[in-house]
Amino acid sequence: MLSIIILNYNGWQDTIACLESLRKQSYTDFRVVVADNGSSDGSVAQLSEWAEEEQVEVHWLQILAFDQNYGFAKGNNKAIEAIRELPSEYYLCLNNDTEMEPDCLQQLVEYMERHQEVTAVTPGIRLYDQPERMWNAGGKLVFGGRRYYYMEQPASLLDGKEELAITFITGCALLFRKELIAERPLFTERFFFGEEDFEFSLRMQKEGRRLVCLPTAVMYHKVGGSQTQVVSYNKLFIHQLNRIINLRSAYSKPKYVLWMMLYVPYIYCRFLGGMSMRERNRFMRLLLHETRINDGVSKELFEKYIAYPFHAQ
């Protein structure tokens, strides 16, 4: 049996589309829990109304209403904890803005049943608005980062490839064995938003666990394919803060120091070109200050810097 966890935050329309996609799956031995992360748009009522109108079986769908937004990592962990009593062999953390081809789940579960040495698997994820183009097919960890496989490339390049060995797996669609959460939560809760799948992948690599992408199991993700979007310095700051704090604990001290010597100038030159010199220097001072005094990025710290006036437009 498979348990599917979907987080919802002010996105009930996408969540319903995701649920409708799941109802069309050829594999049927699964249950779904939608965990609402403190939405303010009436999501719980909308989801409940949809389930009633569609006569969705009570045992198939469970809706949890959290009292606040716990973020991606803690929200998933809380949802998993709430359904531990179910006799599930596998769990799937699934973004609410995704939809699957009807045989996607069947391919993923049957692969896991045939390959007991594999810890987690992900489908080939395509762009929803460009279904013949990949979002990614997993990826690999590199020094201080990750590289997606086949990112925004034609899906036809994967024809004939039944599986890909990967070291980076996205939290967008992560199917894993129950043993993985027997003694610890799935995701670290040190980061309110972002970094959870990178930390997870690093941890799996250190433990020598095998991760796989199945390109023939097709899923669509509603992300923008354009790289011309305006830079958000707030999101950039949060991302860099997450990454530096994470690697400070994940790497040995010599490795971390070497990485920082290379990475700090890279941030300054690569990402901050639209800022004045004064703004660049302030950005870097704040970033390095917060990395020194924090062991994670809390909700409060996230909210502080997601609205911080880094750049005068």
Image (cartoon, rainbow, N blue to C red):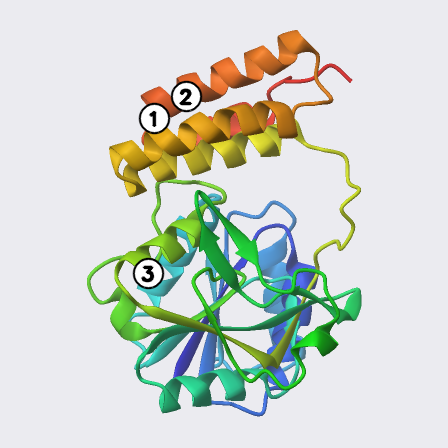
Circle nearer the N terminus (1, 3): 3
Mark 1 = which residue? 294
Where is residue 295 drawn, in percent x and y? 31, 31
Q: Nearer the viewer, residue 104 or 166?
A: 166
Q: Quadrant of residue 182?
A: bottom left
Quick one: which residue is furthest to the top in this view?
Answer: 278
Quadrant position of residue 129: bottom right
Q: Quadrant of residue 177?
A: bottom left
Q: Residues within 10 Å of mark 1 (few under 14, many from 20)?
A: few
> Which residue, given by chain and number where applicable, does mark 2 sit on?
290
Q: Quadrant of the N terminus?
A: bottom left
Number of numbered tags placed on the structure image: 3
Q: Amino acid at mark 2?
A: Glu
Q: Position of residue 77 (x, y in %)?
A: 36, 57
Disc 2 secondary structure class: helix
* Relative vertical location of residue 119 with respect to residue 111 in this rendering, above or below: above
Q: Secondary structure at mark 1?
A: loop
Q: Please name the residue that numbered disc 3 is placed on.
A: 204
